Image (cartoon, rainbow, N blue to C red):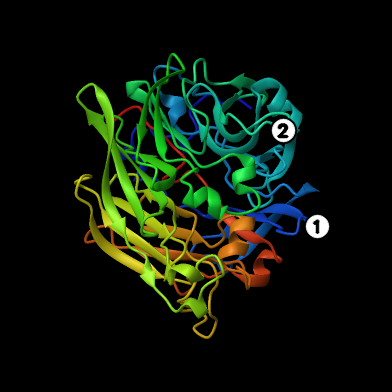
Amino acid sequence: MTRWTPDPTFYASPRDAVNAPPEKLAYVAAFDRTAQRPDAIAVVDVDPDSDRYGSVVGWTELPHTGDELHHFGWNACSSALCPTNPHPHVERRYLIVPGLRSSRIYVLDTGPDPTRPKIVKELGPEQLADRAGYSRPHTVHCGPDGIYLSALGGANGEEGPGGLAVLDHDTFEVRGAWEADRGPQYLAYDAWWHLNHDVLVTSEWGTPSMIEDGIVGELLLGRRYGHALHFWDLRRRTHVQTVDLGDQYQMPLELRPAHDPTRTYGFVGVVISVEDLSASIWLWHRDGDRWAATRVIDIPAEPADPELLPDLLKPFGAVPPLVTDIDLSVDDRFLYVSCWGTGELRQYDVGDPFHPVQTGSVRLGGIVGRDPHPARPELALSGGPQMVEVSRDGRRVYVTNSLYGAWDDQFYPDGVGAWQAKLDVDIEAGGLAVDERFFPHGDDFRGLRVHQTRLQGGDASSDSYCFP
């Protein structure tokens, strides 16, 4: 559906976006680990003035089983206002929802009833395979010229290469693979960009066989998972440079570029170092005519009684932080780091991106800690802060607790459960506090596990801007 005026949720600059009205609804990916029941998009009321605040108020069940919903995104966002590829007629209305395990892609319309998104289109795995040569779709980004979808695997049973597919803004059909020349890139995970500088960045996880049955110890200790960033010419769609972080730094995953389009830096979280089980945050930046990456945060593993650890970790006697998601506030002031293993969400002031300063910490769950939510102090939580999403004004942070089905089972073998929490942010001095009124969990999600959250009207990891 086209519009005569730009969507009011689009903002030309991050400076304008931070003044956006608060979100009223959150969309949450929920999946059935047994693949016996359909996955769903749960709709959570996040309006503190509502009498249903913190409750699941809508539910859209998918038609198939075994999708394993994971990441998803909006069809359009503020990048539609970019002068190079303007699409002001598009509307932030449709959720693009891939099944990571099934390779199906669903399009859900939130327009008629935002609390009950309606499935209006389904793309089978063969359409992604035939048109783009990919499978296992993962990250969705609304670009100025189309919808970008990263994928971990190749088509027709091939392990790789993974890469990027582009979907049409209006029809949602797969146009094809984005890469014109991929150079040495083979592994894939996340992708994002510096639009004004014609630069795209990608990160690495593993091929389908390396992840779908859980983390493979031999591959991890053999340093076989991804450990590099790739920089691309966005306009020419060609590979420009690989920056190898060092093979001890396994799995650089989520990419968070500065929202200020005049900047050419960003952050990536590395899950684990095979040398000491620590996690780390790296800053990518220009170094003369080349790209470079500098490690700016180290988070050590925490010693633990082996009897309290899952089999995978018993030989090490320690809990790795397992940084599996990060998010950057729209004003580029605060970086949030999910330590899924230790059950901690950290907040850093990254006003000086080369010298982050920790300003906040909250603990919920954790492999050993099992810290409870203050609303239910008697309930030991499983899982930990994993997917993290930040409101456009930076005042609210939402976290969910499941990482990925097979990996949940390895690190939380007694069950990961399902919960979502909201944290209130002191945007002046820094600091986090758990909102005791907000704690959908357990049966609220009908026995499904919960992963990514998307906020109505956009959030810190959905939109890109072309004006400072």
For the point 50% across and 71% down, the residue is 314
Q: Earlier in the sequence, mark 2 or mark 1?
A: 1
For the point 27% across and 46% down, the residue is 295
Element type where label 1 sits in the image: loop
Q: Residue 138: x and y, percent?
A: 58, 40
Judged left or right of residue 117, residue 50 is: left
Please identify the quarter of the rendering in which residue 201 is found: top left
Q: Is residue 10 visible?
A: yes
Residue at numbered disc 1 = 36
Vertical placement of residue 214 versus 204, above or below: below
Q: Residue 91: x and y, percent?
A: 56, 32
Nearest to the observer: residue 238 or residue 460: 238
Vertical placement of residue 179 versus 349, above or below: above
Distance (Cα) linking label 2 and label 1: 23 Å
What kind of residue is marked 2?
Answer: Gly
Residue at numbered disc 2 = 157
What kind of residue is marked 1?
Answer: Gln
Which mark is drawn over residue 415?
A: none
Please identify the quarter of the rendering in which residue 435 is found: bottom left
Judged left or right of residue 390, residue 307 is: right
Vertical placement of residue 414 versus 112, above or below: below
Q: Residue 448: x and y, percent?
A: 68, 62
